[in-house]
Image (cartoon, grey):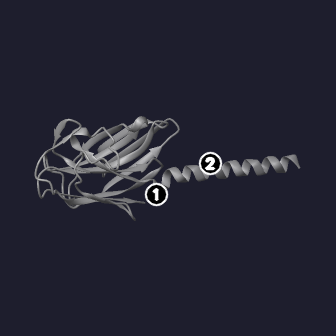
Amino acid sequence: MKSLLHLFVGAVAVFVLVQSAQAQQTGGKPDRAAIEVLPFAREFMNEKFKTNDREVPDELRATTTDKIRIYGKRKLNRTAPVRGRLSAHFGKIVLVPVGNLKGVINVKSPSADDVTYYYASIELEGGKLDTKIIQLSTGVDYAWSVVKGPAQTTFKITDGAKEVVSLSGPAASVKSVGFASTVRYLGNEADISVTFE
C-alpha cells in the first residue's frame, strides 16, 4: 500500500513539473483586469503616474481587448509643466503583470527622433520603472517574451536573431512589463500593436 502511495505522489510531482515547464515555454495571456493603462511622459520615463493624474496631458489612446494597442495623433500644440518641469513628449504606457508570456509587436507609425518614440519597461517594487527607448520600423514582426525564473525575470524584444532590448531584474522585484509610446508635436502619430501567443 505504501509503495502505491509513493508511486502516486511521484506521478503527481512529475505531472506538476511537466506542466510548469510547459507553461514557461508556451506563454499565455494575462488577466485583462490586471492590465494597467497609465499616462506616460518621456521626460519622466522611469516614473509611474497614476491613472487619473491630470498633470500629464491626455495624449494617445490604449486598448487592451484581444491585444494591446497604443495609437493616435498628438492634439496638444505646446509643452506642459509636469512636476515643475516643462515636458513635451506625452502618451500612454500599458503595464502587464509578469508571467511567462510571449507574442509579436508591430507598428504602423515608425520610430522617429523627437517625433514618435516607443518604449519597453519593467516595473519594480515601489512603482519605479526601468524603461528603454526602442527603435521600431513598419513592416517588421518583432518577437517579445517574458521569462520569469526563480531568481530573475527577463523581458526581451528581438528582430529575428537581433536583440532590440533586454530588461531584467530580480524575480521578486519585477511586478509587470510595459509597452509605451509618446508623440511630440501637433499631428504626430503613434500606432503600436502587441499580441499574445
- Which mark is drawn over residue 33? 1
Q: Which residue is located at x 41 percent, y 51 percent?
A: 96
Q: Within 10 Å of the Cα at label 1, are there few (<14), some (14-19), or many (20+) other Cα atoms?
A: few
Q: Nearer the viewer, residue 114 or 196?
A: 114
* Whole-number angstrom distance, CA of label 2 to CA of label 1: 28 Å
From the viewer's perspective, is residue 45 above or below residue 91? above
Q: Which of 42 and 191 is in front in this view?
A: 42
Q: Between label 2 and label 1, give the one nearer the viewer.
A: 1
In this rendering, position of residue 28 left or right of residue 12: left
Quarter of the image for residue 190 reads: bottom left
Residue 78: x and y, percent? Answer: 11, 49
Residue 34: x and y, percent? Answer: 45, 53
- Which mark is drawn over residue 95? none
Q: Which residue is located at x 18 percent, y 36 percent?
A: 85
As helix, strand or loop, the secondary structure at mark 2 comes to: helix
Which three-letter amino acid code belongs to the residue tagged 1? Ala
Which three-letter amino acid code belongs to the residue tagged 2? Leu
Residue matched to label 2? 17
Farthest residue in the right direction?
A: 1
In this rendering, position of residue 170 left or right of residue 143: right
Whether residue 141 is visible to the viewer of this picture, yes or no, is: no
In this rendering, position of residue 178 left or right of residue 5: left
As helix, strand or loop, the secondary structure at mark 1 comes to: helix
Q: Which residue is located at x 76 percent, y 48 percent?
A: 9
Q: Which residue is located at x 53 percent, y 53 percent?
A: 23
Residue 178: x and y, percent? Answer: 35, 48
Q: Nearer the viewer, residue 164 or 44?
A: 44
Q: In the picture, which quadrant includes the C terminus?
A: bottom left
